[in-house]
Structure formats: structure tokens, C-alpha cells
Image (cartoon, helix red, strand yellow):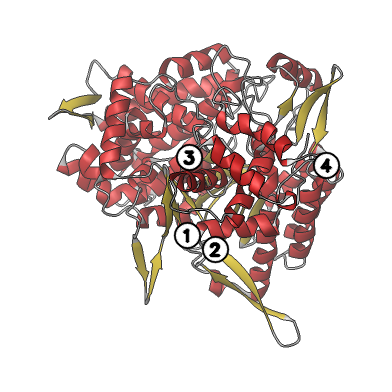
Amino acid sequence: MKKIIFMAATALQIISASPLMAKRSHGAETFNYNVDKFADLQILRYRVPGFEQLTTRQKMYIYYLTEAAQCGRDILFDQNGKYNLAIRRTLESIYRNYKGDTASEDYKAFVVYLKQVWFANGIHHHYSTDKFTPAFSEEFLVKEVKALPAGELPLRDGKTADDLLAEILPVIFNPEVMQKRVNLAAGDDLIKTSACNYYDGVTQQEAEEFYNAMRDTTDTQPISYGLNSRLVKRDRKIYEETYKIGGRYGEALEKIVENLEKAKEFAENDAQKEIIETLVEFNRSGDLKTFDEYCIKWVEELSGTVDFICGFTEVYGDPLGLKGSWESSINFKNHDASERTDIISRNAQWFEDHSPVDDRFKKEKVKGVSAKVITVAMLGGDCYPSTPIGINLPNADWIRRDHGSKSVTIENITEAYDAASQGTGFNDEFIPDEHTRRLVAEYGFVADNLHTDLHECLGHGSGKMLPGVESDALKAYSSTLEEARADLFALYYMGDKKIMELGLLPDKDAYKAEYYKYMMNGLMTQLTRIRPGDNIEEAHMRNRQLIARWAMEQGEADKVVEIKNMNGKRYVVVNDYKELRNLFGKLLAEIQRIKSEGDYEAGKNLVEKYAVKVDADLHNEVLERYRSLGIAPYKGFVNPRYTLVKDENGTVTDVTVSYNEGYAEQMLRYAREYSFLPTYND
């Protein structure tokens, strides 16, 4: 749970909604960042600057890692819902073979729905986790399915098109079936009411009891229980289906391993080879102790330029916060931009020592904090098409304590957002005064990147658990509180004079740009991401509203932050930035205490009071103002395409990168080239 997630992590990405033809010039080259726009989504491209300057071996290393990254695509679709592969493959077959009227309303709505399914890696929204509502008719889908030859349909053995339709129609069209991929509503059975495919036949109580019985509370180096498995109940017996070669998802994992083995031959050093060998061993055995060995080797390898994530990692998609979704990110270091993260890493102990939290919860000695700015070369699984802008791993608290962590800021992704942000009218619509607009325009990008650096490098790596406190003591509230803790650490220190002493911001008031955007986002503008009448479910949205609402309430007497009505519209106004910083410090101290002591009730109360409920009138106003601007609330990316260059003897001499693949074109190619799992994994 250590990410600034997808495109919604900071106010940068709200402001970064863009006109469809935004372009940026790079020397003689004009790069078109925009690809497609539909529903509430905009699809962008990202550049991979510096790839051409890498050595041929480094390019080959990246090439085979990018192949491994795509081989796990179907795993995530299946993890997100048990019918996702059947539905996606059915829709793709209709799309490829359609011979009807492409101008019909049914067909146009069908195409939008398919594009949404591609983007979300399933039938539930990638952010809200609500099920998509198709705007095409059930009759249209039935007609098109029945028009296809049986060989074009993902049928179970011995079954017909009618059998397929009987299975998927209720899932697609009935709003009462599989309503949410991840339900976090207090009081519900979170497993029974969530459509994700990490559990089958078990209740929340049964799952919690199953994993509680496994734990040894005296173990100071516990494995990540349940990370790489599906928990099922058959004939009154509960057991795990482990993700491994020969087990669940084995067909895809074999292909991943095949490409990892090829990549190993081009690794930059022996440590990278050992990392791959250990990851391969984990994919073969499914042994979580081997996974810990891999994490330790990975976090300690700092000399190479190329790096990667490729496996079961983050747990946001599980309502209990245990099961890892499959994801991949292939990257290489941006050496010039990493100067600021190097400075942060070298001063990690100072930041820990001067944190406003109780000394009992501080690390006496900060170990192995490494941070860098990276250029992402390929996104896969739960990082694609919607990607984080920062990552901090590994997740295991004891590995972070004993071996450290790696933090990255993905600057070519933030560059793409920034390039696509020009000329939307957002700042004029939501920022009430010219002084603040100038502040945001001048310092917004650099302040956002520093916030990401501090969040990932120091925020997640700060503090410690008290002895005997379980890592999942905060249960369903853990992700929200952890992201709030990291955000607060970053926010608190952005306003510290130490930042200027270290040369991390260009002006003593630059931090105010981030403070303003954060409060505006948490109190107002992020509401564009949810439907009228809904509560906030997603952990990062909850985190931001928790911080913003708590700070506004605590500073109400002194009017530190207000929502003011001006000329019939509401705006966030920050009157006292210094006191706002003090409030961030107070909340950081409390949330660190909650985590360190495992105070579930206090954490629950904070989240339920400040993070979940929405002001309906304000929500409707924000939605209307967004609609008037024509801004898409969410963004994601198509990947570049890498091609091996061979000489007349078939020897690889180079790897080239191209950026001309369209959204549907890429998704259909991935379906052709990287579909290794059977449609049904019951």
C-alpha cells in the first residue's frame, strides 16, 4: 500500500485534464500526447526520453522485461472479477467481426463500454469500483453474440452461445449483480459484497479467522499472508489456490518466467541476475518466504540503471488489504532529475528526527532509504492504462525496517500530465484569485513532484510499529490511513525551512501552491470522480478528504481554511498557510500513533467521520462546473512499442521505440499476443 496511485494522486492531475490536441515540442520533434477520449477518460501517450542513449544490452534488458510485463495482463482481469475474461473476449470478438451499422447508437455505446472495460481491466470502474452501466441494449448484445461462429466465442466445453449469454448477461446488465469490485462500507460483509475474485465461497469472518490462525504474533519477520493466493471454500473446507506455475495463473506465469529468463542474460550486474533468479523461483514455488528474499535483494540493488516491478504487489483491490494484484513497471533512472531525491535520501534521518510525532514512534536509525526519479519504459497489469506517479516498495514493514525501501517519482508520466494540462480553464474556474493562480502556475509542477518525492521516499518509510502490533491491525482502514500518513509527512515538511536550505524548492512560498491544490482537491474538485449520491470508497480519495476536512474543522475558529461563496460559486480559500502546516503536523502525529499502536477504533472513527460522506450540494456544483469545461476526470496511457532490430544474419543489433499505436489498436494486439489464461478459472 505504498503508492501515489493512478492519475489521481495529487491536484496536478486534476488540473492536468487537457484539450484533445495538446502537443509539446521537443527540439525539432512535436510530440502529440493525446490519443483518445471517451466516457470520463482521456488516453495519453508518454515519451521515453533517454532510451536511445542506453547501451544495446540495457535496451535488450528492457525489451524482455517489457514482454514479461504484458504477459500478466489476463491475471489482473481475472483477479478483478471472475467473468471479466469471458466478457472482454466476447466483446472483442464482436468488435473485430462487426458488420452492422457503425453509426447506430447501440454500436457507438458498445464501443465506449468496451473501451471502459479495457481501461479498467474489467467491468468495474478503475477508481470508484462501481460496475459500468452499458448504454447499449441487451438485445443488441444478444444479436451480435448469436451472429458469431462458435469458434469466435469464449465457450465452456460443450456449451453454446445461449449458455454464454445466460452467464454474462446478468453480470453486464443487472445493476444488483456484482455492484462493486471493492466494497468498504462499514457494517457490510466486505467479501460477500465485493465482486473482486480473491475469495470464493467464504465470508469476511471466515477469511479473517483463516489468516489469523496462520499468524505467529512472536514472529518479527512475518510473511505477507495471502498475498499470492485466492481463498476458496469447497465442501465446507477453506483453502488457498496459490498463484504459481502449476497452480492458479500458471499458464501466464510460465510466459512471464520465460521472458524474465531472457532478460537475465542482459542484466547489468550479478545482483540483478540474482533478483530475477529469486523472482523466478517464487513464481515456480509460490513460497512467500522466497518472495521476501526477492524483496530484500531488490531493495538492496542500487547500482543498476534499469529496474522493474513484475508480480503480485499492491493490495488496494482486496477489501481486506491482503491479496496482491498483478502489476508491472519497467523503468530506468533519470540521473539528472534524481539529484533532488538523492538529497532527500541523504537527509532521511534528519527528517525522521524532527518529525512532529511522538518519539516512541520514530525510527532510531533510518536504514536503506533510497530514492530516484525514473523514466518508465512500460506499464503492465495494475499500472496500466492508469498508472501511479510514484511508488515506494516493498510493503512488508519488517523489510522496510531492517533493509530499507526504494522510492521513485515517475517524471515522464508527470511530464505527460503537465503537457496535456494547458488551456483547460480549470484554474480560472476553481481558483478564486489571481495571486493564487499565479502561484499554482509558477510552482505547481515542481511542488507536485517534490510532494511525490517526500511522500514516497520519506512518508511511507517513516515511523515504526510498536512490538506486537500486527501489520494489518487497521484492517479495511489501513490503506486510507497509510496514504494519509505519507501525504501528511510530505505536506508538513514542504513548508519547513529545511526544504529551502536543501535547495529543493525555488522559492520560500512555493510550498503554498501544493497546500492550496491539496485542500482544493480534498474538499472539492476530486468529487468529480464519484457519482451523485455515492460515498467515497477509494482509499486515496478518502485519504485526501480526511486530511482536508479535518484541517478545515480544526482551524475553523481561526478561519485557517474556508469554503467561500463568491458570485454564486464556492471556492476554497486558505487564509493562514503557516497554521495549516501546524494542523498537518498534528494530524500526522495522531495517525502515526494510530498505526504504531494498531488503534483500530481511533482509525475507524477518523475515516468514517471525515473521509466517507459527501456534501451533496457541493458535489453537484463541482460536477456541473466540470461539465462546463469539458474536462475528463481520469487519464491513462497507451504504451510505446519496442521492436528488435536484426542484421542480415538474424543477430539483434538494436531496439527501437515507437509511439504511433492507437488505443483500440494496442488493446486488440495485446489480446492477440498476451492472452495465455483460459477464459474460465473457476
| 418, above or below 169, in the image | below
The residue wearing badge 4 is 157
Q: CA distance from mark 1 to mark 3?
A: 23 Å
Callout 2: few (<14), some (14-19), or many (20+) C-alpha neighbours within 10 Å?
Answer: some
Question: Amino acid type of disc 4?
Answer: Asp
Question: Amino acid type of disc 3?
Answer: His
Q: CA distance from mark 1 to mark 2?
A: 8 Å
Closer to the chain start, of discs 1 and 3, is 1
Closer to the chain start, of discs 3 and 4, is 4
Find out whether the residues at labels 1 and 2 contact each other: C-beta distance under 8 Å: yes
The residue wearing badge 3 is 455
Question: x, y percentage for residue 430?
Answer: 24, 37
Residue sitting nearer the eye, 601 or 250: 250
Find out whether the residues at labels 3 and 4 contact each other: C-beta distance under 8 Å: no
The residue wearing badge 1 is 46
Dot in front, 4 or 2: 4
The residue wearing badge 2 is 640
Determine whether, in the image, residue 259 is placed left or right of residue 469.
right
Question: x, y percentage for residue 226?
Answer: 75, 30
Closer to the chain start, of discs 4 and 2, is 4
Q: CA distance from mark 4 to mark 2?
A: 37 Å
